[in-house]
Image (spheres, rainbow, N blue to C red):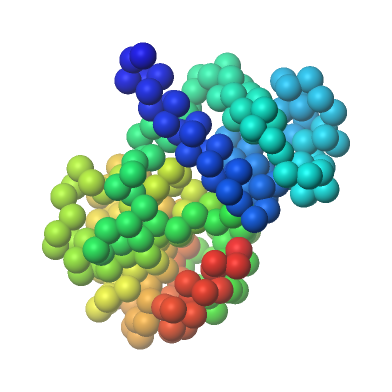
Amino acid sequence: MDEAQSNNKDIKERMAGEIALAESPGNVMRKWRELFGITQSELAAHIKVSASTISDYESNRRQSPGVGVIKRFIDSLFEIDISKGGAVIKSLEKFASPKASASPFYVVHDFTSPISAVDFTRIIEGKIIANPSYLDSIKLFGYTEIDSLRVILEMMPQDYPLLFGSTTERAFLFSQVSTGRSPMVVIRVAPIKPKLVVMHNLGNVDKLAIKLAQVEKIPLITTKLDLNEIRERLKKV
């Protein structure tokens, strides 16, 4: 087995485990299907079942899927993606890593099902500082809580992709922020960007931070909600 096949096997096993162990397996199935950018009809046609069958599983109207159903579901996502050039699989291979889930200065959180950036902002009681018009078009699959100072001082540049977990479709929530300038400078020069940036407990945002967010077309949000409360609220997503 070559490296690519081994990586794909690991990713499939992680996906299968997440679905099988979830309280709402259908929500997790829908999350992965949407992350792959595949419609219910497209998936149903590939598996040779009705679109309503896929909908029933994702809505938890059918009993929890067995091992066989989960395997067919995941294999089909991979096969469809490969037929389109394999962009999602390549992204998962690049970002997925056992080290990506936790660190002394960042923690990667994935949602059971994706949420809109508008809902995310409402949940954390956020105030929109830059690019509010982009919120409606953004869907988030998770967020990464980042100790701003420690990441900037201690993280090696080659480890930056670990902040994304398995997808770039996420928000960065920076704590220990003084002006907001340094985190936005890092994002500006980095090759990959989050979809949304949150600055925690920050009074006045540096004008350069706002300008960089505008240049990158990334919504910039501040919140003063307690971090533990944010975590508890987003656990329910």
- Residue 228 vertical position relative to residue 26 in the rendered view, above or below: below
Quarter of the image that includes the C terminus: bottom right
- Residue in front for this viewpoint, 98 or 155: 98
Residue pictured at 59% horizontal, 24% vertical: 75
Residue pictured at 43% horizontal, 83% vertical: 226
Q: Percent from the top left, x then y, of residue 111? A: 55, 56
- Residue 126 vertical position relative to residue 145 in the rendered view, above or below: below
Furthest-top residue in view?
Answer: 1
Q: Is residue 38 visible?
A: no
Q: Is residue 176 visible?
A: yes
Q: Percent from the top left, x then y, of residue 129? A: 46, 73
- Residue in front for this viewpoint, 41 or 30: 30
Quarter of the image where one finds residue 234: bottom right
- Residue 203 vertical position relative to residue 165 in the rendered view, above or below: below
- Residue 55 vertical position relative to residue 76 in the rendered view, above or below: below
Numbered disc total? 0
Q: Is residue 9 left or right of residue 121?
A: left
Quarter of the image that includes the N terminus: top left
Residue pictured at 60% horizontal, 67% vertical: 236
Quarter of the image where one finds residue 34: top right
Q: Percent from the top left, x then y, of residue 225? A: 47, 83
Q: Is residue 15 left or right of residue 204?
A: right
Residue pictured at 54% horizontal, 79% vertical: 125
- Residue in front for this viewpoint, 129 or 17: 17
Quarter of the image where one finds residue 143: bottom left
